[in-house]
Amino acid sequence: MKKIIAVFLLFYTISFGLTSKEKDILLKVIQGAYKDKVYSVAVKKSQEYLKKTDKNDIYRRQVYKILFYSLYYTKNKKDFWKLIKNSDIPEEDRDIYYQLGLNLFKDEPDKLEYFYKKLEKKLADDKKEKIAKFLAVEYVKRKEWEKVLSLPSYKSINLYKLISLYRLKRYEDVIKKTEYLGIYTQEVKDTVLYFRGLAFSKLGKEKKAVSTIEAITFKTPEMIKFLANYYLKHKNYLYAQRYLKILSLEDEYKDYAYYYLGVIEDILKRYKEALRYYKKASVYKTKYGKRAKERISILEKALPVYSVRLILLSSKKKAEGFIREKKLKNCFVKKYKGYYGVYCGKFDDIEDAKKFQRELQEKGFDTWIQKI
């Protein structure tokens, strides 16, 4: 019987590749390397020990701890992630390793989500909320709206949940979730009301949408743009101008604001003012700048241009000589009824032309205002 036991023990030891002496030496190396913070050696030897010993070995639990902590301290994410999926890890220690995982993968949403779900019920509320907020922000960036909604409700992330409802076109739910503002942090309440207004708009309740957004104290440029669009659509140009002028103070919206201010003046047939706004919009290399340039070209061809004529002469040479002799500025020669006229200035508005005419008359010139 003793011989049978001896043979079995010998087979058992050989099958796992370690004698008792070798196992003792390996354990000492593992413990020493970890104590001396030589974590790369601790990792390598721990992996060797776990590979060559039986699952019932009494030291495996301790070796697993050394291995996990060594991987954690060396930020070896690849091997840590691979190891955490191992079903052989002692159940009683898994929460410890999940906690390490929360810290190690704090910037990787997919991995963090795994550890968060494993520990969600055991985490302190402040840490749980902090992780949930990080995940919410990442999910919003990736447009994973359903994942945002699966997170617990905290004041710090309820805005992200509201945005997700809106992006999923659940407008009725958006309205329900904005009836009580107490579930949101103070600094986002204006934004919450904005989404409430947008939801009303999507449901065809435009008056409610506008009244909601107009009630917001500190309006963002997007809110102002929404109101300007609404009043443009409903031909309330006075209110549209009010919001567009406010919007023109924002660098990112100047092209849009100037273009539509020009459109309003165009509609009201105040073409001089329309041109002024279009020219402001045209300096931007955007679709509104392009549209403004197109409209400027059309208006400049259609609108009369006035100039002040001083004299008619028999030849172009004489007319040019007259300009030099009188030292005239902003003047040019243009043929008129077989003669060559000397013209000064170009004006969109006849009143501006008349003002310039008076200045020239005071200098002793006979003048006529003429369309050119």
Image (cartoon, helix red, strand yellow):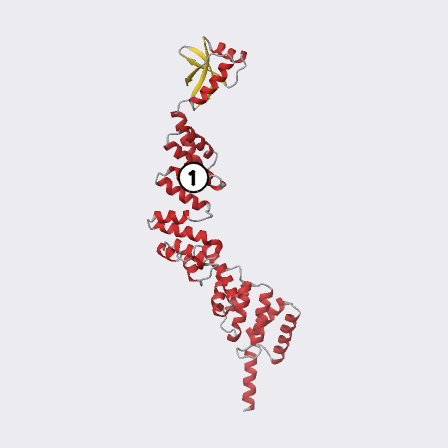
Residue found at x 45% / y 20%: 353
Residue found at x 57% / y 72%: 65
Task: Please name whichever residue, 311 or 192, is drawn nearer the observer in this view of the structure.
Answer: 192
Q: Relative to 147, is 345 above or below?
A: above
Visible in this render: residue 111? no
Name the outermost residue toward the bottom. 1
Visible in this render: residue 180? yes
Does 87 sit left or right of 240 as displayed?
right
User: Total of numbered circles in the picture?
Assistant: 1
| Quadrant assignment, res 257 | top left
Q: Relative to 358, is 253 above or below?
A: below
Task: Please name whichever residue, 279 or 250, is drawn nearer the observer in this view of the structure.
Answer: 250
Q: Relative to 108, is 64 above or below?
A: below
Q: Residues within 10 Å of mark 1 (few under 14, many from 20)?
A: some
How far from the left and from the top, in percent, is residue 118? 48, 68
How far from the left and from the top, in percent, is residue 345? 47, 20
Name the outermost residue toward the left. 204
Q: Which residue is mark 1?
A: 242
Q: Where the N terminus falls, by quadrant?
A: bottom right
Does 203 sit left or right of 272 as displayed?
left
| Quadrant assignment, res 174 | bottom left
Amino acid type at image mark 1: Arg
Residue found at x 45% / y 51%: 190
Q: Where the C terminus falls, by quadrant?
A: top left
How far from the left and from the top, in percent, is residue 253? 46, 41
Numbered disc 1: secondary structure: helix
Task: Please name whichever residue, 45 or 61, is drawn nearer the observer in this view of the structure.
Answer: 61
How far from the left and from the top, in percent, is residue 148? 43, 59
Name the outermost residue toward the right. 36
Q: Relative to 74, is 17 above or below?
A: below
